[in-house]
Image: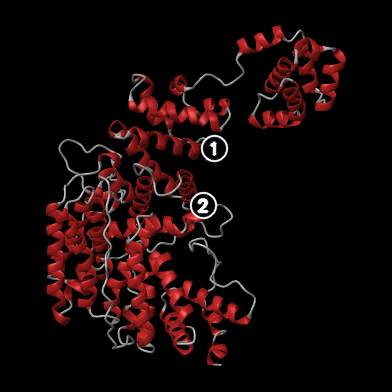
């Protein structure tokens, strides 16, 4: 068959790189051993690893076109899987759809229908994965006019449906309406860096005028909502009377480019979004499809707390100066959307590759972060931005999107992989430390957890000299309390003596008491043991087995004299005392004498 003749070419067309499935929830769709299954997996791998190069795009689209419609179901599933699970490559898959539209327009019609269905399904849920997929699907649909798959006016109608749902909720003003409506406006604005230029400048069906109406509707919504941050989500208290609103900031960035775009559509250009589509302008098909109507489901909440738990504010950290992280939006430099796109890339990559923090995964998240298409003209600025964004995600309140240890490991891996990154990371930490008085207590403790874990993995190296002034602060001063919290955690993760030696003399006052057994408890146990504690200590030193100790307790009469509970206490104290050098020694001794302890516990009832 034609499919059998061409399917093997997928393997040859796939670019050489390591396999990774960590970002796909679950395994491949077919894991059987038949030739058909293997061919389908080769097709799936070819779609996943498509890198957007002209040669690969043309080859892959030709191969798929030859095999369609025989493989429609599988190809559709694989493309939609990639659109929803590989956030950085949305333009790549939109371009692939555009190329297929010239050869198999009926398949592209199915892609568009399926994308709308998946978007509706994702909008019914408040789970973090579904929220992310809804944003990525709306982005994908908004890009389709750029590749000629749908009319710009049709994409704007989909976007307008989402905005209208937010406005309707604002009109009804039921309890807890705003967080979800904010989310709907957010995912609409979030599509603009990828689609804004086409949607705002196209004159087909008066699309540019419809675009302005859409922007006006968003502005109308922003005027109805309550401005200001969610108090429970503020990592830092805003200084003075300043209002820090995440959605207003995003609108300000998009609106700035929108105004500039009226004079120069190129103002929408974002350096972080590679122009994948440019080489194919003459290759896209002329068939324009009409997306099915989108229905945005309504959601009800008991109040703002429940709504914010389901749709939290977008996490952000603005601790460094704008000059360091994105520049001042000067001509020829980064524009207002550059930082937003970079933050989206980072958050989406952490989400897509989160299983990579489990060391068994082949490609961890940190390696993917190192390959993001961030602008190459300011590498230091990119590193500051990455560090600040990572800490913003890690410290997000009321809870981060992923387990705290995941962020710890990503920062550690970046420090190991990029020699210049530790200095940029330390700069962010230093600035957070300087403004610690405004930091939320929960975020402060979370930062202390990270810092102790990080230092324990990097030979306890930190420029403590720059923080020695905290020794003169009152005990409850935020900076002193933070340093003391870090040191206390370090003593749990490393040897006390090593932690002490890593600190300058001025900060040794922050050390807790050296860990060890309570001398009063030891003295009490010794007095109550009738000399058995000394004997037990000798047994520990000679590594006497548990059964021999039980035999000695019986033969010496100590078990009858002390009773089983007291004998168990003596054995436990002896093991703890002998093994107090480190936790490993404790574990070895307690495991060795576990049978004896179990026997004594059973005897004691």
The Cα atoms of the two marked residues, 1 and 2, are separated by 21 Å
Q: Residue at x 43, y 28 (%)?
A: 485
**Above or below 469: residue 287:** below
Specify whether residue 439 is in view.
Answer: yes
Question: Where does residue 534 sit, x and y in percent of width and height?
Answer: 77, 13
Assess disc 1: are there few (<14), some (14-19) or many (≥20) residues with their C-alpha within 10 Å of its C-alpha: few
Using residue 33 as the reference point, say whether residue 189 is left or right of it: left
Q: Residue furthest bottom?
A: 1
Quadrant showing the C terminus: top right
Question: Which residue matches tag 2?
Answer: 357
Q: Residue at x 14, y 63 (%)?
A: 217
Q: Residue furthest right?
A: 555
Using residue 44 as the reference point, say whether residue 580 is left or right of it: right
Question: Which residue matches tag 1?
Answer: 459
Using residue 414 as the reference point, say whether residue 183 is left or right of it: left
Question: Where does residue 429 sit, x and y in percent of width and height?
Answer: 37, 39
Question: Where does residue 110 sit, x and y in percent of width and height?
Answer: 37, 80
Using residue 66 as the reference point, say whether residue 324 is left or right of it: left
**Secondary element at image label 2:** helix
**Above or below 349: residue 53:** below
Which quadrant would residue 11 be assigned to in this image?
bottom right
Which quadrant would residue 167 be assigned to in this image?
bottom left
**Secondary element at image label 1:** loop
Q: Residue at x 46, y 46 (%)?
A: 403
């Amino acid at each position: 068959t034609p499919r059998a003749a061409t399917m093997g070419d997928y393997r040859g067309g796939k670019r050489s790189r390591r396999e990774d499935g960590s970002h796909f929830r679950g395994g491949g769709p077919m894991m059987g051993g038949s030739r058909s299954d293997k061919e389908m997996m080769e097709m799936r791998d070819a779609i996943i690893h498509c890198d957007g190069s002209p040669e690969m795009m043309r080859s892959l689209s030709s191969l798929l076109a030859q095999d369609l419609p025989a493989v429609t179901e599988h190809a559709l599933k694989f493309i939609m899987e990639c659109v929803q699970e590989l956030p950085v490559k949305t333009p790549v898959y939109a371009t692939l759809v555009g190329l297929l539209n010239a050869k198999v327009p009926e398949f592209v019609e199915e892609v568009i229908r399926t994308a709308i269905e998946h978007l509706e399904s994702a909008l019914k849920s408040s789970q973090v994965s579904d929220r992310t997929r809804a944003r990525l699907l709306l982005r994908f649909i908004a890009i389709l006019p750029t590749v000629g798959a749908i009319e710009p006016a049709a994409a704007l109608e989909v976007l307008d449906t989402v905005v209208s749902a937010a406005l309707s909720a604002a009109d009804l003003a039921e309890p807890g309406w705003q967080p979800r409506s904010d989310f709907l406006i957010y995912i609409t604005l979030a599509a603009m860096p990828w689609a804004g230029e086409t949607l705002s400048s196209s004159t087909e069906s008066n699309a540019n005028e419809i675009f302005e109406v859409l922007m006006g509707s968003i502005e109308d919504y922003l005027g109805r909502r309550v401005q200001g941050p969610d108090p429970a989500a503020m990592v830092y208290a805003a200084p003075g009377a300043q209002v820090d609103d995440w959605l207003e900031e995003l609108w300000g960035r998009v609106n700035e480019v929108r105004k500039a775009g009226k004079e120069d559509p190129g103002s929408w250009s974002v350096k972080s979004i590679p122009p994948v589509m440019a080489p194919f302008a003459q290759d896209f098909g002329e068939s324009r499809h009409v997306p099915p109507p989108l229905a945005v489901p309504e959601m009800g909440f008991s109040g703002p707390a429940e709504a914010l738990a389901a749709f939290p504010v977008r996490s952000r950290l603005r601790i460094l100066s704008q000059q360091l992280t994105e520049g001042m939006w000067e001509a020829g430099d980064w524009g207002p959307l550059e930082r937003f796109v970079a933050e989206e890339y980072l958050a989406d990559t952490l989400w897509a590759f989160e299983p990579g923090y489990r060391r068994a995964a082949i490609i961890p998240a940190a390696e993917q972060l190192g390959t993001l298409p961030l602008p190459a003209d300011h590498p230091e600025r990119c590193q500051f931005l990455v560090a600040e964004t990572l800490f913003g995600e890690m410290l997000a309140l009321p809870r981060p999107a992923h387990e705290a240890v995941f962020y710890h490991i990503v920062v550690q891996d970046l420090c190991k992989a990029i020699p210049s990154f530790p200095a940029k990371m330390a700069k962010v930490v230093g600035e957070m430390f300087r403004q610690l008085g405004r930091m939320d207590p929960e975020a402060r403790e979370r930062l202390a957890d990270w810092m102790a874990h990080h230092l324990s993995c990097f030979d306890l190296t930190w420029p403590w000299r720059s923080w020695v002034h905290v020794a003169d602060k009152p005990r409850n001063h935020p900076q002193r309390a933070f340093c003391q919290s870090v040191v206390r955690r370090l003593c749990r993760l490393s040897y006390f003596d090593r932690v002490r030696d890593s600190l300058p003399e001025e900060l040794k006052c922050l050390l807790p008491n050296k860990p060890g057994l309570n001398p009063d408890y030891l003295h009490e146990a010794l007095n109550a043991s009738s000399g058995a504690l000394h004997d037990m200590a000798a047994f520990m030193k000679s590594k006497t087995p548990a059964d021999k100790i039980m035999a000695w307790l019986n033969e010496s009469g100590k078990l009858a004299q002390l009773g089983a509970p007291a004998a168990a206490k003596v054995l436990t104290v002896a093991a703890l005392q002998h093994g107090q050098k480190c936790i490993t020694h404790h574990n070895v001794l307690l495991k060795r004498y576990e049978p004896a302890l179990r026997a004594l516990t059973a005897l004691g009832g």
